[in-house]
Image (cartoon, coloured by chain):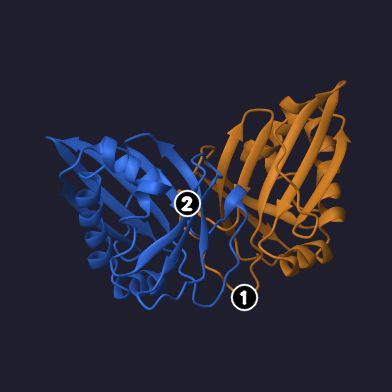
Chain colours: A orange, B blue
Amino acid sequence: MTRPDIDPKLDLVLERTVDVPPRLVWRAWTEPEHLMPWFCPRPWATVECRIDLRPGGEFYTQMRSPEGKDMEGGSGCYLEIEKERKLVWTSALGPGYRPAVARVHDLFFTAWILMEPQGQGTKYTAIAKHPDEASAKRHEEMGFHEGWNTVVDQLAEYMKTI
Amino acid sequence: MTRPDIDPKLDLVLERTVDVPPRLVWRAWTEPEHLMPWFCPRPWATVECRIDLRPGGEFYTQMRSPEGKDMEGGSGCYLEIEKERKLVWTSALGPGYRPAVARVHDLFFTAWILMEPQGQGTKYTAIAKHPDEASAKRHEEMGFHEGWNTVVDQLAEYMKTI
């Protein structure tokens, strides 16, 4: 598996297994109707999603708080796509590779979602690369490990039902 | 030629012809020894260049003022590469797609360099896409059109000598 080099000061890594096969993990990440049910830790919800699955294509999600407040939606941009193996996108670019507007509270990172068959399930690796230590620390304090673990549980639980 | 959609408020475009063929324009853009002689409007100079020509690879240039002062060097990241036709890179990401640190005076843009055979020469299109109108305006005021035109003249003049 093509895993990028990790810088422990700048990158956050989640490695685990999931008991659904790569085929279903891939569909969960690349089909809006199958992404929205698991993408936010409940009781938060993902209420809109657009996926234009090609390098330079848009990855948009809109989240809603348990109180019903919509967060400002964000468009990311896909960079590398290897079906059922690797998905790379960044929040630092929008659709068509246009640089994202840098607002004060934005968190810019590039994410790798890597999947490998393991028995009947998937060896799942999520990596978030940040521009500096402050961003990586902020992402960690926002609950990167807990949040990304929770949604992978939600992903597996949901994909068993489709 | 795959030309991206243009937003006149956010994008700067330079279209012209160059009297060397796409093969030489490509080499001028992708081989450090052939990039450094023309990449800055003289009497500025490009004193260092690294090119890792693959998606996610580094594009680094270091410029020196006529007074001999080195500017802070910047690493960009290649996004799309089609030999002798298209080169796309961004200053919003560094090597390995890591988001660039957003410093106050940084200008983030994604650039397309497009080339098509035209007679013995090249139809040459350079596009810079910016996150917002302020960045596009600043890039224009920094002399985008004059500067990018000048260096293309330097490119053609130099490539005829190799």
Mark 2 sits on what residue? A97
Disc 1 crowd rating (10 Å Cα; few below 14, some 14-19, many 20+) is few
Quick check: B70 left or right of A141?
left
Q: Is residue B4 visible?
A: no
Tell me the kind of residue under disc 1: Val
Residue at 79% from the left image edge and 40% from the top image edge: A125
Where B156 falls versus B131 (above or below)? above
Q: Provide residue A95's location: percent of width, then percent of height.
A: 48, 51
Relative to residue B153, is residue A13 drawn left or right? Answer: right
Quarter of the N terminus of chain A within the rendering = top right
Q: Residue at x 36, y 69 (%)?
A: B136
Residue B73 position in % (x across, y down): 51, 65
Q: Which label was assigned to residue A104?
A: 1
For badge 2, the amino acid type reads Tyr
Q: Residues within 10 Å of mark 2 (few under 14, many from 20)?
A: many
Identify which residue, A39 or B73, lies in the foreground: B73
Front residue of B161 and B113:
B161
Quarter of the image where one finds residue B123? top left
Q: Secondary structure at mark 2?
A: helix
Mark 2–mark 1 CB contact (< 8 Å): no
Q: Residue at coordinates 18% horizontally, 47% vertically from top-left?
A: B18
Residue A158 in the image: above or below residue A38 = above
**Which of these two is toward me, A26 or A48?**
A26
The answer to whether residue A137 is above or below residue B34 is below
Q: CA distance from mark 2 to mark 1?
A: 21 Å
Residue A18: which disc?
none
Q: Secondary structure at mark 1?
A: loop
Residue B71 visible in this rendered orientation of the protein: yes
Chain letter of disc 1? Answer: A
Percent x, y of residue B142? 32, 74
* Residue extending furthest toward the top: A119
